[in-house]
Image (cartoon, rainbow, N blue to C red):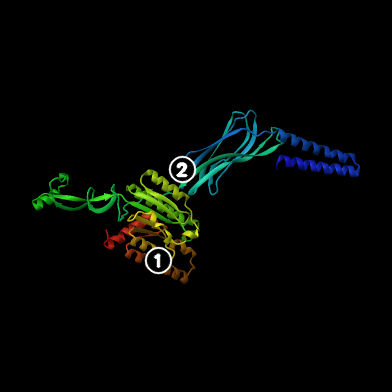
C-alpha cells in the first residue's frame, strides 16, 4: 500500500473519531484522534522528504547463448551511486517459462553510498528468445514510514538454441550445383575422390592419375577419371502449421522437428553446401542460403524463435513460395502432409525441377495413448499406417526421397533405414 493512501486512511479514521467525540461530547474520545492525525502528518512529511535512490544496476550472464539442455549463471549487481543510504528490496525479472534452478533473484537491505550488492542464480530456459526487462521492488525512508515502488530498466536477452544430433552419410542428388568444390557428386569427371571410370592416357594428363594395374593389363597407359564434387543449395522447409503438430504427455512434436531441422542444417553446412531455411506457417520467415559457421548461427536463431502458427494464409502447403528457391536446388521438407492436397505438393515440386527429400515425422506411437483401447484402437492405428504407407510409396515412385522418421527415435536411425531401403531397391 502506498504511503499517501496510508496517510489518507489514518486521516479519515482520525476525523471519524474526532466527529464521534464531538457528537458524544467526550474529551477522552476526542483525544484519541490526535495520534491518528499525527501519524497521517508524519507519513505525509516522510513521503515528501523521501528521495529516489540513485542506483546503477547490471546483469551479466556466464553465457547469453545456450542450448536448450544447458543452464546459464546470472550475476545481478546493484550499486548505490548516491550520497545517502538506501533501504530497498528489488526482485529481478524472470521471463515466462524460464526456471530458476538455484540461487536468489532478490536483493534486500541497506545499501550504503558507493557499495555494491550482488546476487547470483542459475537459469534453465526452453528453446526460444527470452528477454529480461528490468527490476521491480520497493524502497523506504530511513525511519521506515514512507514506502515507494521502484522500477529499474535493464534489458538483456538470453537465446536458448535447439539441440541437434550429428548426422552422416546423407545422399542427395540435386539437379543443379555451383562451380565451387563441395561434397555433392555430379557424375561428371573432374577433381574428386570417387573413381568415375578409366580412359587411355592423353598428352597433358596428370601422370598421378595413371592406373598402373590397368595399364599393365592393357599394355597401354590408362588413367583414372574422378567424379567431380561440387557444392549446392539446400533449402530446409519446416512445416510450422499448428494443426500438423501434437502435444502429448509433455512432448511437443514441433520441438522434435525443430531439432531435426537443426541436425540437417548442421550436416549440409559441414559438407560445404549453402543452406537456407523457411519456417512455413507464420509470416514469411526465410533465411537466405549461405555457407559457413555464421550461417549456422543464423539458422539456429531462426529455429529457436520458431513456433507453431494458425495463420490462414499458410493453411495449405501448396502456397510455399517456390520463387525463393533456385531452380534445380535440393529441398528438404519436414511435414506430415495433413491432407490429400498437401500430399501432392512434393511430387509437384519434383515436376518443377527440384530435388525433393521428404522427412515424414511418424507420430503414431505418441498418438497410441489417445487411441481407444481394444480392437477399435488397433483397427484405427492400422488404418492410419496403411494410409501413410500408401502416400509415402506413391511419393517414392514419382522421385521423392522419402525418410519415414519414427519421431520417438533419433533422426540418424531413420536415415539408416532409408539407406537400407534404397539399397534394396537398387538405387545408389
Mark carried by residue 388: 1
Quarter of the figure that contains the C terminus = bottom left
How far apart marks 1 and 2 lie (CA) works out to 39 Å
Where residue 120 appears, x then y in whole percent? Answer: 54, 38
Could you tell me if the residues under marks 1 and 2 are in contact, i.e. CB atoms within 8 Å? no
In this picture, residue 207 sits left or right of residue 355: left
Rendered residue at 84%/43% (across/down): 17
Q: Mark 2 points at which residue?
A: 65
Q: Position of residue 81 (x, y in %)?
A: 60, 30
Asked whether, in this view, residue 89 is left or right of residue 255, the answer is right
Q: Give the residue at x 79% y 36%.
A: 38
Q: Residue furthest left?
A: 219
Judged from the image, the secondary structure of the residue bearing numbered disc 1 is: helix
Q: Looking at the picture, how far across and down is residue 11, in whole percent? A: 79, 41
The answer to whether residue 410 of the structure is visible from this angle is no
In the picture provided, is 379 more to the left or to the right than 155?
left
**Residue extending furthest right?**
25
Amino acid at each position: 500500500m502506498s504511503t499517501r493512501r496510508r496517510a489518507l486512511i489514518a486521516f479519515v479514521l482520525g476525523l471519524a473519531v474526532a466527529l464521534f467525540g464531538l457528537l458524544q461530547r467526550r474529551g477522552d474520545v476526542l483525544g484519541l484522534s490526535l495520534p491518528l492525525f499525527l501519524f497521517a502528518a508524519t507519513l505525509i512529511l516522510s513521503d515528501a522528504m523521501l528521495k529516489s535512490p540513485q542506483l546503477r544496476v547490471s546483469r551479466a550472464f556466464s553465457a547469453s547463448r545456450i542450448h536448450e539442455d544447458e543452464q546459464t549463471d546470472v550475476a545481478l549487481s546493484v550499486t548505490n551511486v548516491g550520497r545517502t543510504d538506501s533501504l530497498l528490496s528489488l526482485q529481478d525479472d524472470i521471463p515466462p517459462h524460464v526456471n530458476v534452478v538455484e540461487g536468489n533473484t532478490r536483493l534486500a537491505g541497506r545499501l550504503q553510498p558507493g557499495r555494491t550488492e550482488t546476487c547470483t542464480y542459475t537459469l534453465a530456459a526452453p528453446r526460444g528468445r527470452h528477454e529480461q526487462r528490468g527490476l521491480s521492488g520497493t524502497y523506504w525512508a530511513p525511519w521506515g514510514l514512507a514506502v515507494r515502488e521502484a522500477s529499474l530498466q535493464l534489458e538483456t536477452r538470453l537465446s536458448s538454441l535447439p539441440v541437434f544430433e550429428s548426422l552422416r552419410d546423407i545422399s542427395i542428388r540435386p539437379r543443379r550445383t555451383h562451380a565451387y568444390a563441395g561434397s555433392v557428386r555430379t557424375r561428371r569427371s573432374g577433381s574428386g575422390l570417387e573413381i568415375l571410370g578409366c580412359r587411355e592416357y592423353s598428352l597433358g594428363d596428370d601422370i598421378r592419375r595413371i592406373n598402373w594395374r590397368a595399364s599393365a593389363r592393357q599394355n597401354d597407359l590408362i588413367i583414372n577419371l574422378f567424379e567431380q564434387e561440387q557444392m549446392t543449395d539446400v533449402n530446409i522447409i519446416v512445416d510450422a502449421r499448428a494443426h500438423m503438430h501434437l502435444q502429448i504427455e509433455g512432448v511437443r512434436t514441433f520441438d522434435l522437428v525443430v531439432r531435426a531441422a537443426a541436425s540437417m542444417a548442421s550436416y549440409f553446412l559441414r559438407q560445404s553446401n549453402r543452406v537456407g531455411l523457411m519456417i512455413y506457417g507464420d509470416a514469411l520467415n526465410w533465411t537466405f542460403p549461405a555457407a559457413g559457421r555464421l550461417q549456422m548461427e543464423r539458422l539456429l536463431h531462426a529455429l529457436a524463435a520458431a513456433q507453431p502458427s494458425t495463420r490462414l494464409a499458410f493453411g495449405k502447403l501448396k502456397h510455399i513460395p517456390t520463387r525463393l528457391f533456385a531452380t534445380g536446388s535440393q529441398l528438404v521438407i519436414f511435414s506430415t502432409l495433413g491432407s490429400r492436397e498437401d500430399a501432392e505438393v512434393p511430387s509437384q515440386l519434383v515436376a518443377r525441377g527440384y530435388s525433393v527429400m521428404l522427412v515424414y515425422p511418424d507420430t503414431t506411437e505418441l498418438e497410441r495413448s489417445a487411441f481407444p483401447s481394444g480392437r477399435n484402437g488397433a483397427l484405427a492405428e492400422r488404418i492410419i499406417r496403411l494410409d501413410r504407407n500408401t502416400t509415402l510409396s506413391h511419393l517414392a515412385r514419382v522421385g521423392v526421397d522419402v525418410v519415414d522418421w519414427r519421431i520417438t527415435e533419433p533422426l540418424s536411425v531413420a536415415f539408416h533405414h532409408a539407406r537400407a531401403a534404397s539399397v534394396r531397391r537398387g538405387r545408389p
